[in-house]
Amino acid sequence: MSASIHADARARPVRRSFDTDGPGQTARVGGRLAAWLAPGDTVLVSGDLGAGKTCFIQGICAGLDIAEPVTSPTFTLVNEYDGRLGRVPVAHFDLYRLDDPESVLDLGFDEYLDACVCLVEWGDKFPEIMPSDAVKVTIEIGAGTRRTLEIAGGGKLVADLEAAVR
């Protein structure tokens, strides 16, 4: 199932919540999402500090066969993962330390949008410059390692993700 998220996301945006029991299951949902991603797709991930944004993105990258370690680009602001190791190139952004949309654009954000799968931590900070058809993931902290992931995207994508938490 390697269809892009765009066609379905524009036609029928669907919002669904998933409860996970720990980091492994959170990453598994991300890995399942990876099956839908292609260059030009964007995933916006938001949640409090320690919610599991990077864990979710690590799952996506594992699902995209990225072999190198995936860490949050908190200080570098963007990490690029070479498509030679995976099936598509990935640009992983962390917008936590940025104060305005111009700072994001100064990173060359708009140049990555068509060439890579863009994974954006704190993706809710600057909605005015984010693609309107991006998949939106909000992670809420529960008791212990439990998390609730609210994912908004195409109907087929959301239905497929349900299998990852069963």
Image (tube, rainbow, N blue to C red):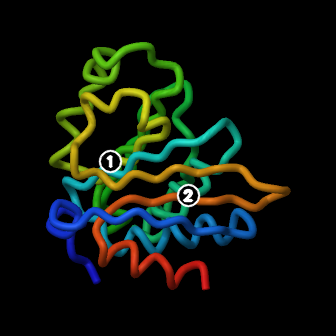
Closer to us: 79 or 52: 52
- Image: 35 above or below 41: below
Instruction: Report x, y in % for residue 60.
Output: 46, 63
Camera-side residue of 139 and 29: 139
**At 61% from the left edge and 55% from the top edge, which residue is drawn?**
55
Label of residue 91 in the image:
none
Q: Quadrant of residue 104?
A: top left
Q: Does 148 sit left or right of 130 as displayed?
A: right
Q: Residue at x 69, y 59 (%)?
A: 147
| Residue 7: percent from left, percent from top | 14, 67
Q: Residues within 10 Å of mark 1 (few under 14, many from 20)?
A: many
Name which residue type carries label 2: Phe
At 26% across and 22% down in the image, what residue appears? 105
Between residues 140 and 36, which one lies in front from this camera angle? Answer: 140
| Quadrant assignment for the C terminus | bottom right
Considering only order in the chain, which callout, 1 or 2, is on the residue closer to the N terminus?
2
Q: Which residue is mark 2?
A: 56
Q: Is residue 152 above or below residue 3?
A: above
- Across and down, in percent, residue 117 comes to 29, 53
Mark 2: few, some, or many residues within 10 Å (few <14, many ≥20)?
A: many
